[in-house]
Image (cartoon, grey):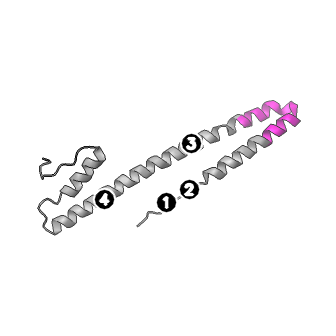
Amino acid sequence: MPTRHPYPDPDLQEITDRNRTARELIATFARSTATLKDLWQHVTTALQDTPVLVAEVFRLRAEISKYRLSRANLIAAMRATLHADAEGEHDPLSYLRNELADQAGHATPNGPNGAA
């Protein structure tokens, strides 16, 4: 069952487009009102932060997705372990042990004591 987020994901492309439009408008205003050029430069400098922030949001989204997948895989392994235990399997912890080893990047142990 997918988890609903308490906040909507912003449309980062739309934000980037509006930012570009705003910078273009400010450049036009700065050319037409030379006396306010310094003021417009402050606004332009502030708007230049947006692309950096958008890139950081993309990076964080990718990182969160990775952690969500890792968590989902661990939960699935835990459920498989509990089900295997209820079914009386010889080594029910193997599901959890294998997932933990996969996430750690280690060779997957086969035996109950971690022996291959």
**Tag 1's secondary structure?**
loop
Left of 52 or right of it: where is 110? left
**Tag 2's secondary structure?**
loop
Q: How many marks?
A: 4
Of circles 1 and 4, which is in front?
4
Q: Earlier in the sequence, mark 4 or mark 2?
A: 2
Q: Which residue is mark 3?
A: 55
Magenta residues, start to end: 25-44
Q: Earlier in the sequence, mark 4 or mark 3?
A: 3
The CA span between labels 2 and 1 is 9 Å
Residue 97 on the magenta span: no
User: On residue 75, which mark appears?
Assistant: 4
Asked if disc 3 and disc 1 are in contact, CB closer than 8 Å, the reply is: no
Q: Amino acid at mark 1?
A: His
Asked if disc 2 and disc 1 are in contact, CB closer than 8 Å, the reply is: yes
Q: Residue at x 66, y 52 (%)?
A: 14
